[in-house]
Image: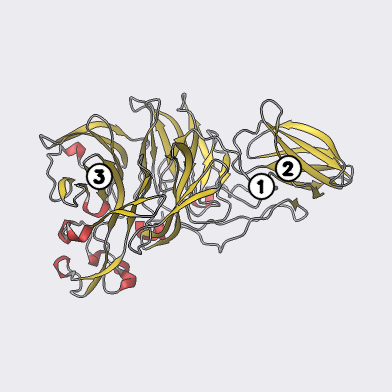
Amino acid sequence: MLRVSRRHFIEGAGIAVFGAVAGATVARSSVFPLPASAAAATPMPSPTTSAGPTSPPDHTFVSTKLTTPHVSVWSSGTTAPGLLFAGPMGHGSNGLIMDNEGRPVWMEPTGAGVTDLRVQSYLGRQVLTYWSGQGIGGHGEGKGIIKDTAYRTIAEVSAGNGFKADLHEFTLTPSGTALLTSYPTIQRDLSSVGGPDKGYMYDCHVQEVDIATGELLFDWTASDHIRLDESYVRPSDDQTANGTSASTAYDPYHLNAVDLRSDGYLVSFRHTHTIYLVTRSGSVAWRLGGKNGDFALPADAVFAWQHDVRQRGAGVISMFDNHYKDGTTGTSRGLLLAVDETRRTARVKLELARGGHRGNAMGNVQFLPNGHYLVGWGSDPAATEFAADGTPVFEATEIGGGTYRVYRAEWAATPETLPDVAALTGNGSTMQVYASWNGATAVASWRFLTGNDATALSEAVVVKRTGFETTAAVAAASTVAAQALDSSGKVLATSVAIAA
């Protein structure tokens, strides 16, 4: 059974690997660029998922070179409405929108590194957002991307002060700003934690940036406020992060979530097992968890290596409690804590666990509009939807080699790109035609057009959409095109006509 560190797992993120398209005689209306191949490290499989040689190969298509994992799903009840948003690692596209059957709706087409793919609101309208960049040493260097419902990029958000935006957070606020994190490398005396006195470490910055102007509105530096001895990680734990050089920088904090409150920012440090309330003036108002926590925590409320800390209503703080890392024991869970900030107490309000899922890295908890919860298990490549009482009603597994976070949201999109069409020759009198339209959500059926040339096409067949790619057998012809139709039969878009 393979074990990988979180640092090496994240280093494997961010590069999609495209599979070859079956059939050398396929004609296509578009060809997507192929990035350099790189496989993500494979996380330790959970008892409820399969991994390694027994997993099915990546799902390939005829009309496009895009690939995606074969995601398996289980359901025992009604889910919240909407599609699923994930970032599968090491298996095809790193950005994936899929339906409740695990079938792709949109696959990020360029091979760019993607984490935290989700639907947010910007300037009063729905947008698709994600971080894009390169995974480095357990964090990332890149920027936030905002796309409209035609998948056009309408904004790119960079960190301030010349830093690179880290992969862990890209949250939009109602005031038109974005919350970002960054991991600059600094020189620091690490002797207090057993490292070199002239050492190197990753500092951590919390930033709030105005999306429209790029103005840096808030920049908080962890090393100015948090002592190194709060960390549960030592330079001696990992020779690739021992602090002896910039390339082996020590990571004492590992900032992985920021949430906006009216009185400041809720900040999560994985390596200190602590949630901090940072005021707008930059001071630390309190610590929840860790070595220097200000709150009394009963044994069942103690968390470790946590991710995706969020302030909810009625004094509730949610998180994904990884609860273990390499070589330790524990079962991961979605955790809702009822926190009394006046009395400095916290208790478990709800625990969301299933089937021994263990995500030693990444993970999230989403509150859904119908009262359900969605838990993404991070490096354990699965996501589970729970009813309000904690009963599981849906699960998707084999989401690549893991996914940073998983969300559910309603999403209606019409791409500005045209549909893709392909044809494979048959027995001489027939041919098999294929159509897809990456990211389209309103297609109900496909009309295939054939003829002797692009100016003389006529309807060959209309067939119901059967997933990301729809296929039909038609009489052989020299030219083919495809039209995407909505539920009323209206033409949404027509592909380029291609030689069959």
Question: Is 253 situated left or right of 191 in this image?
Answer: right
CA separation in Å, label 1 and label 2? 9 Å
Q: Position of residue 389 (x, y in %)?
A: 33, 24
Return the disc, 1 or 2, that comes first in the chain's sequence: 1
CA separation in Å, label 3 and label 1? 43 Å
User: Label 1: which residue?
Assistant: 61
The residue under the point 37% across, 45% down is 363
- Answer above or below: position of 444 versus 247: above
Crowding at dot 3, Cα within 10 Å, few <14 / some 14-19 / many 20+, comes out as many
**261 or 466, which is in the foreground?**
261
Query: Split into 4 quadrants, where in the image is the N terminus?
Result: bottom left
- Answer above or below: position of 253 versus 448: below
Q: Nearer the viewer, mark 2 or mark 3?
A: 3
Which amino acid, mark 2? Tyr
Q: Pointers 3 and 1 in contact (CB under 8 A)?
A: no
Return the disc, 3 or 1, that comes first in the chain's sequence: 1
The residue under the point 83% across, 38% down is 474
Return the disc, 2 or 3, that comes first in the chain's sequence: 3
Q: Position of residue 197 (x, y in %)?
A: 18, 74
Which amino acid, mark 3? Leu
User: Label 2: which residue?
Assistant: 434
Q: Position of residue 245 (x, y in %)?
A: 29, 74
Which amino acid, mark 1? Phe
CA separation in Å, label 2 and label 3? 49 Å
Q: Nearer the viewer, mark 3 or mark 1?
A: 3
Q: Pointers 1 and 2 in contact (CB under 8 A)?
A: yes
Q: Residue furthest left?
A: 343
User: Label 3: which residue?
Assistant: 266
Snapshot colouring = secondary structure
